[in-house]
């Protein structure tokens, strides 16, 4: 797949290894799900069930998950708002940035400062919406899954759209509305889920050179390090 792919992969693994940043972001997602769903019971709140599964797939401790739920149920909890921003990065790369914040003024000011320093442009809302498709994405340990063709057939009824194998990991994709049914199906077969998330997949991914990626990554890393940023989706192939 080339040096550019390996560069991107290595830097991505480096970023997502920052557990000190990751767990608070997962906790925010859980708290938001509790408030929006009106319940701290995952059986009664599908969004909370999704957030908990994503947290467990990242090895977030049970105590942290329960603490996030309790904070959201508390009367004095901070009001967290979900908001998206769209950015044109160096060399024409596109970023769809999902945030969870208690101060949108601070969040947008921070993003603008990163763009001004490292190159790029803030875009108006909904500029990139049509360029990404929302998908449910599961990364599952290949070991123990058995025959993959049979697995694919079994998951079609649960909403499977595609199944891809990358070394020891099986990537399972479906429409975002199928997250719950796919999650239940994987739980039924006791699959070892390494990651569970709702993602935005670029409809037309673009290849960038290693030199271009180095410029793009500087801005991407800075944005992803921001405490208010939950996830950044790009059109990088």
Image (cartoon, rainbow, N blue to C red):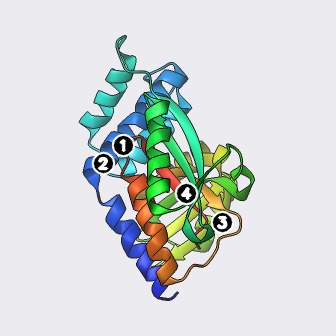
Q: Disc 4 or 2, which lies upstream in sequence? A: 2
Q: Nearer the viewer, mark 4 or mark 1?
A: 1
Q: Earlier in the sequence, mark 2 or mark 1?
A: 2
166 horizontally vs 124: left or right: left
Res 69 visible: yes
> Residues under labels 1 and 3: Cα distance?
33 Å
Q: Secondary structure at mark 1?
A: loop
Between the C-alphas of marks 4 and 3, the distance is 19 Å
Does label 4 or label 3 sit earlier along the sequence?
A: 3
Picture coordinates of residue 226 (x, y %)? 38, 47
- Answer with mark 1 or mark 3, whichever residue precedes in sequence: 3
Residue 174, position as x, y percentages in the image? 65, 56
Disc 2 to disc 1: CB gap under 8 Å: yes
Q: Circle 1: is it few (<14), some (14-19), or many (20+) Cα within 10 Å?
A: some
Tag 4 and tag 3, C-beta contact below 8 Å: no
Q: Are marks 1 and 3 in contact (CB under 8 Å)?
A: no
Q: Secondary structure at mark 2?
A: helix
Question: To which quarter of the image does residue 13 belong?
Answer: bottom left
Residue at image coords 44%, 21%: 79
The secondary structure type at the circle numbered 4 is strand
Q: Residue furthest top?
A: 75
Tag on residue 233?
A: 4
The foreground one among 163 and 221 is 221
Image coords of residue 160 (percent x, y) = 66, 58
Q: In the image, which disc is placed on residue 162? A: 3
Looking at the image, which residue is at 68% across and 56% down? Answer: 132
């Amino acid at each position: 797949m080339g040096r550019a792919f390996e560069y991107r992969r290595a830097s991505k693994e480096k970023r997502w290894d920052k557990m000190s940043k990751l767990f608070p972001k997962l906790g925010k997602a859980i708290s938001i799900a509790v408030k929006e769903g009106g319940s701290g019971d995952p059986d009664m709140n599908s969004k909370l069930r999704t957030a908990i599964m994503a947290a467990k797939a990242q090895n977030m401790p049970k105590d942290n998950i329960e603490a996030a739920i309790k904070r959201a149920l508390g009367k004095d909890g901070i009001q967290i708002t979900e908001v998206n921003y769209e950015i044109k990065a160096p060399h024409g790369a596109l970023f769809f940035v999902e945030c969870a914040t208690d101060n949108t003024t601070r969040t947008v000011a921070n993003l603008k400062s990163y763009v001004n320093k490292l190159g790029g442009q803030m875009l108006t809302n909904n500029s990139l919406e049509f360029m990404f498709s929302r998908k449910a994405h599961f990364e599952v340990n290949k070991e123990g899954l058995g025959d993959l063709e049979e697995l694919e057939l079994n998951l079609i009824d649960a909403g499977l759209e595609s199944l891809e194998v990358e070394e020891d990991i099986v990537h399972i994709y479906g429409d975002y509305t199928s997250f719950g049914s796919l999650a239940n199906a994987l739980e039924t077969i006791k699959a070892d889920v390494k990651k569970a998330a709702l993602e935005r997949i670029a409809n037309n991914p673009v290849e960038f050179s290693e030199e271009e990626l180095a410029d793009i990554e500087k801005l991407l890393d800075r944005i992803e390090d921001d405490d208010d940023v939950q996830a950044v989706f790009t059109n990088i192939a």
